[in-house]
Every structure is written in structure tokens, then in C-alpha cells.
Amino acid sequence: MTVINTIKPAEAFHYLHENSLPLFLSFHLEEDRGHLITGRGLCYVEALHSGSRVKLGRFSPYRSLHALRSSESFYVHFEIQGNSYGCVMENITPDNSFIVADIPGVIYPFLRKFMRVEPSKKTPVLLHVISQQHGTVIYPIKDISERGIGFFTETLPDMGDNPVCGIEMPLDGNTFILSNAVVVYSKDDYRQAQPGTQSRLQAGQQGIFCGMQLFPHHEDEKRIRLYVMQRELEIRKRIQEQF
């Protein structure tokens, strides 16, 4: 990942403050024991302290503030003059309606185009692929967007040059779609805690984390988008109920 040199972090947060632009939050919640999901919200820069600390307020949904109070760090992304950036906020000091955190040392390009959600442990999304070694194999999906999925596997399956995968979603009872796909990355012992950072694996997740780009039919892309939107609403409701 290439560090952006065109704007310094302190300058970026000053610009956000002066122009009252939002920061979009991503933070982890424990939905079920050992099962982490990503909550989202937004906030604004309320003040800068000595060029090294920033005061964040006007959280929406408001209860996302309560979720962040127990976090060691969280991820934000924002847009400045047509460019998207992201960074990790650390050294958090919570208050009744504000959070003060360090201005990060570096900011990075934010390249994600589609919202990505983690399925529920109780109603998982399943990936079906044909492997050269074992025939059809099924994986619970770690996260999904309308153009990509991520999953854990003990060994990377040999799916050939032009794999077609099946995706089973808890949408309208049960929905099964087929999509061309390509493996875009795989990482041994992949560990994710905050979006954009790496930390401990969740319980039971070991081995290789595999990311696949999807090329679904436009009607199937709509179905994935609908699932993602419904799941995001579930997570927002969870934030309201849990905090």
C-alpha cells in the first residue's frame, strides 16, 4: 500500500474541520461469542489539539460512540477534493459525547468501492466451488460485497483458470446464484481486527485467507447488493440494541 504524500495527516484533519466534512467510521462489534462484525457510522472533527490530537463529535448513529469507547482503535475514511483517504485512529480518550484520539502518522488511499459486510454466524453465506482435488467444497464466507468475497481455508483449492462459484445467501428464505470469479489474493495466517489493519484471528479461523473478485450477472449483482443492504440494517439495529 502506497502512502499518500500529497497531503499530511494534520493538514487533512484541519481541512476536514474547516470545511465540516464527515469522517466515515468502521469499528468491530462482537455479534456472537467470538464472531466479529463491522459497525459503521460517521462523525466530524470538532477541534484540533496541539497539532497531534483531534476531537471527534456529532456521532451518527449516536450509539456508535458507545461502541467506540471500548475500542483500542478504529478506522476512518474521508474524502478531500475528490480523493479518498483512510487511516487508523489510536490512543483513544472517550468523553460523554466526544472522543479524542491521536492524529495518525500516515494516511492511505481508500480504494474500496463497494460496501462489505460480515454475514451472521446463525445465518451464514456459503461459497460453493469446484476444486480439482476434492470436487465441490463449501466454505462459510467471512465477508461479502457485490463484487467480492473473502473466506478462510486450510489449503487453497485448485479451481482452474476460469472458476465459477456458487453463492448461497439467506435472502428471501434462500437464494443461490452463480458467478464467474478470480482469486485476487491469498495470505497465510491472515489476521484482521480493524478494517485496514491486522491483528488476531477470530476463534476457529486459521490457515489461508482468500479474496475473490466476483463477476456476477447484473440481476445477481442486485441480489447481492440487496443482501448487503439488509445485513447492514441488521448491524445498525444491533448497535442500537447493544449500546
Image (cartoon, grey):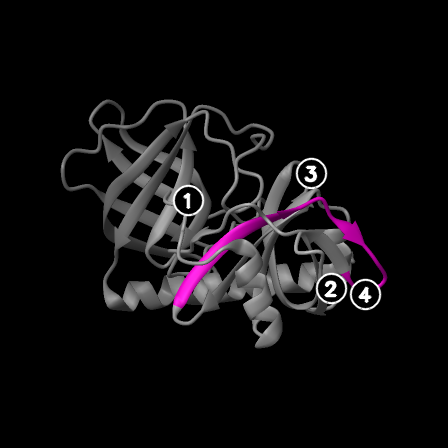
Mark 3 = which residue?
33
Question: In terms of secondary structure, where does tag 4 sit?
Answer: loop
Q: Earlier in the sequence, mark 1 or mark 4?
A: 4
Considering every residue shown, the one lying at the far right of the view is 96
Mark 4 Cα-neighbour bin, 10 Å: few <14, some 14–19, many ≥20:
few
Given contact means CB atoms under 8 Å apart, are the residues at marks 1 and 3 in contact?
no
Q: Main secondary structure of the magenta part?
A: strand
Considering every residue shown, the one lying at the far bottom of the view is 19
Q: Nearer the viewer, mark 3 or mark 4?
A: 4
Mark 2 = which residue?
240
Given contact means CB atoms under 8 Å apart, are the residues at marks 1 and 2 in contact?
no
Amino acid bearing label 3: Arg
Mark number displayed over residue 126: 1
Question: In terms of secondary structure, where does tag 3 sit?
Answer: loop
| Distance Cα–Cα, label 1 vs label 3 | 20 Å
Given contact means CB atoms under 8 Å apart, are the residues at marks 2 and 4 in contact?
no
What residue do we see at 58% from left, 39% from top? 193
Mark 4 = which residue?
97
Q: Nearer the viewer, mark 1 or mark 2?
A: 2
Which quadrant is the C terminus positioned in? bottom right
Question: In terms of secondary structure, where does tag 2 sit?
Answer: helix
* Magenta-highlighted residues: 83-98
Q: Is residue 132 above or below residue 233?
A: above
Amino acid bearing label 4: Ser
> In this orientation, which residue lies closer to the viewer: 92 or 202?
92
Residue 219 in the image, given as x and y percentages of width and height: 28, 68
Q: Earlier in the sequence, mark 1 or mark 2?
A: 1
Q: Is residue 104 magenta?
A: no
Q: Is residue 70 above or below residue 185?
A: below
Residue 143 in the image, given as x and y percentages of width and height: 46, 47
| Distance Cα–Cα, label 1 vs label 4 | 40 Å
Q: Earlier in the sequence, mark 2 or mark 3?
A: 3
